Image (spheres, grey):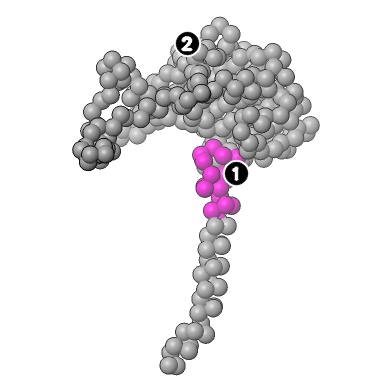
């Protein structure tokens, strides 16, 4: 009985201690920001872009804020730059006409949109799957794993097992037409695997300046992605070998900038691969403007 009473007396203290531990754990997670996606401006770890965000706040004449709304809620673009870090090629290549129109209106109003894509060591699986479908005359490849086979089977009302049509990520929802970035803006995505060292570990490549601008002559490049055969209305700023990796296009009084890599904007790059005194050309992307980070 005495032990039971002692336990009851200690129970509130134990619960309070447990609650404090949970709260402290969540607080630490939010402080580091690793609960957010890679290249989020809320992350302070190497994969975040908070250092870049806070550096913009130090620029005179520039106001900075995070934009966490949908594309359809973009404000007027005049004298405003919207940064999109760590974008996904699949999502950017699967937009609706209304989404494109909203982005274009933002730029025609005088805004600039800077999109940097998440780094990839090699060609993504979704692209390889699409190429395999095209080579096989749009026939789906048979699943290799047992769990894939079970996922592809369903039972009908009679209890008999039949094959389920695989989900196609390019399938359109009723009433919604998806438009590729190539059809809308005249660019396509290509991939050239990053080099490997003797141990088979992927290494960074080098992107070299193509335009006559006050920018670093070369920077380390950490992605296999490049922009395949952009049209003549695109200006190439950097290339990896012969492949364009940072390009810009005018839209009215605004412009659109695509960077195949996000690494050089990350907290890690700000510490390891800075170019002090060599990037005076970069502020033209946001000088005398408001900056929004999506």
Left or right of residue 112, residue 150 in this image: left
Local crowd at mark 1 within 10 Å, few (<14), some, or many (≥20)?
A: many
Residue 76 rendering spot, x and y as whole percentages: 73, 26
Res 55 seen here: no
> Which residue sits furthest right?
61
> Which residue sits furthest front?
158
Q: Is residue 16 above or below residue 74?
A: below
Identify the residue shown where x is 68% and y is 27%. 81
Q: In this view, does 64 lie above or below 261?
A: below
Q: Is mark 1 on a helix, strand or loop?
A: loop
Identify the residue shown where x is 49% and y is 84%. 8
Asked if marks 1 and 2 touch (Cβ < 8 Å), the reply is: no
- The residue pinned by badge 1 equals 42
Upstream in sequence: badge 1 or badge 2: 1
Q: In which quarter of the image is residue 26?
A: bottom right
Residue 256 rendering spot, x and y as whole percentages: 62, 19
Identify the residue shown where x is 57% and y is 20%. 97
Secondary structure mostly taken by the magenta-highlighted segment of the chain: loop
Q: Quadrant of residue 163?
A: top left
Measured Cα–Cα span from mark 1 to mark 2: 34 Å
Res 248 seen here: yes
Q: Is mark 2 on a helix, strand or loop?
A: loop
Q: In this view, does 81 lie above or below 272?
A: above
Residue 270 rendering spot, x and y as whole percentages: 58, 36
The one nearer the camera, 275 or 50, is 50
- The residue pinned by badge 2 equals 229
Image: magenta residue range: 28-44
């Amino acid at each position: 009985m005495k032990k039971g009473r002692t336990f009851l007396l200690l129970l509130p203290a134990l619960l309070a201690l447990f609650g404090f531990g949970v709260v402290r754990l969540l607080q630490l997670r939010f402080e580091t920001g690793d609960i957010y996606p890679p290249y989020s401006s809320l992350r302070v770890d190497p994969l975040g872009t908070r250092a870049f965000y806070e550096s913009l706040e130090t620029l005179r004449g520039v106001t900075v804020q995070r934009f966490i709304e949908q594309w359809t809620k973009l404000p007027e673009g005049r004298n405003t730059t919207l940064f999109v870090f760590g974008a996904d090629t699949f999502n950017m290549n699967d937009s609706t006409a209304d989404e494109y129109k909203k982005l274009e209106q933002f730029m025609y109003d005088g805004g600039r949109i800077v999109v940097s894509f998440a780094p990839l060591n090699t060609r993504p699986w979704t692209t390889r799957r699409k190429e395999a479908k095209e080579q096989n005359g749009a026939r789906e490849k048979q699943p290799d794993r047992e769990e894939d086979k079970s996922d592809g089977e369903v039972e009908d009302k009679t209890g008999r097992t039949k094959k389920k049509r695989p989900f196609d990520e390019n399938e359109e929802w009723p009433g919604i037409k998806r438009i590729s970035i190539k059809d809308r803006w005249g660019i396509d995505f290509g991939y050239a695997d990053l080099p490997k060292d003797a141990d088979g570990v992927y290494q960074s490549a080098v992107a070299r300046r193509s335009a006559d601008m006050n920018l670093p002559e070369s920077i380390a490049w950490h992605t296999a992605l490049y922009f395949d055969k952009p049209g003549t209305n695109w200006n190439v700023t950097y290339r990896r070998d012969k492949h364009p990796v940072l390009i810009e296009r005018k839209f009215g009084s605004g412009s659109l900038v695509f960077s195949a890599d996000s690494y050089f904007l990350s907290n890690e790059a700000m510490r390891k691969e800075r170019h002090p005194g060599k990037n005076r050309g970069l502020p033209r992307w946001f000088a005398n403007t408001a900056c929004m980070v999506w």
